[in-house]
Image (cartoon, helix red, strand yellow):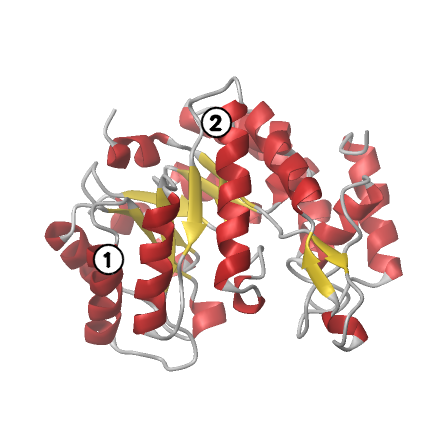
Amino acid sequence: MERADFIRSQRLYTALPTSFETRTDRYPEPMKTQIDIDTYRQLVCLQFDEGNSVLTSGTTGESPTTTPQEEAYLRMGALEEKKNHRNTDIAVISGVGSNDTMHAVEFTEAAVRGKVDGALSVNPYYNKPNQTGLYLHHAAVAEAGKGMPLIIYNIPGRTCSNIEPETLMRLHEKYPNVVGVKECNPAQMTPEVISQYPDTFKVWTGEDGVIVPNMQAGANGAVSVLANADPKGTREIVELCARQEYEKAQAMLDERARFIKLLFDGVRGGNPASIKAFLKRQGFGNGEVRLPVVPATSELENELYEAGKKLGFVG
């Protein structure tokens, strides 16, 4: 199977949080963290055991506050676990996004050297480029990838920019290694839009709460935060949708609605603070995050734990 086909064939990518541990040095208390690679690799294996592919250094992985050296360390850890795992039908993709095109190109070149299966390129944030700027930015990343499969990440709520379907198609036609989009714009998750894309261009929803309607509209699968807490159930939801068993899938998703709402409670936690708090209670890491993200409140942590317990997420 060609690399692009392999990336397109994956229904579920789990957006991994980056595990940190406290260190003692000259930094202020909230910045005294370094990579906890042992916990991180445990989280990778949890996903591989269920057949889920993984995304390193995405938003959930706190890519804005990890260094290129740390991101290379995370890629290496995930790839080593893949090499040693019994399941070979799993992919490791890495975030290469930046609002500086030069930096995004450098991150992509590093991902190529790291031999990951593919990459995720988010729209430039804060500088609000128009469609021409978005096209040229992702084109530069695609060229730097030297054929490495690339998924565009469209999340207007975080970046204040929206890449339109026509721009995505321009990229795909010029650069066949642009294999799809992680889409978080509801207006572009409709059958009318998705049906315009060729079979060689896939759509993954980036919103856990609407996996079922988005796949019913034509999405290929999901890039999920929920799967960190529920790797087996999330995969089952996606596979049910792939078999067009939408009623069963929606029933499962409805059961998880409160937990998902708690995961994305931006007042008391948010992503990735909330999923890290839940994983901490499961014995995976200490819940550490890097500023400007702050830990979830103890109240939210307890609510997540109790909600997860009722759903059978707590071992």
Q: Is residue 298 left or right of residue 211?
A: right
Residue at 35% across, 80% down: 128
Mark 2 touching mark 1, by CB under 8 A?
no
- Residue under label 1: 144
Image quadrant holding the N terminus, namely top left
Return the residue found at the far bottom.
127
Q: Is residue 142 left or right of residue 223?
A: left
CA separation in Å, label 2 and label 1: 25 Å
Return the residue found at the far front.
25
Residue at 26% across, 77% down: 130
Residue 87 circle label? none
Please name whichever residue, 260 or 270, is drawn nearer the observer in this view of the structure.
Answer: 270
**Residue 22 in view:** yes
Residue at 48% across, 51% down: 206
Q: Is residue 205 left or right of residue 179?
A: right
Q: Which type of secondary structure does the marked residue at label 2 adopt?
A: helix
Residue 100 in the image: above or below residue 110:
below
- Residue under label 2: 83
Image quadrant holding the C terminus, namely top right
Q: Give amino acid for label 2.
A: Lys
Q: Give amino acid for label 1.
A: Ala
Q: Residues within 10 Å of mark 2 (few under 14, many from 20)?
A: few
| Residue 198 at x, y percent in the picture | 18, 41
Q: Which type of secondary structure does the marked residue at label 1 adopt?
A: helix
| Residue 126 at x, y percent in the picture | 43, 80
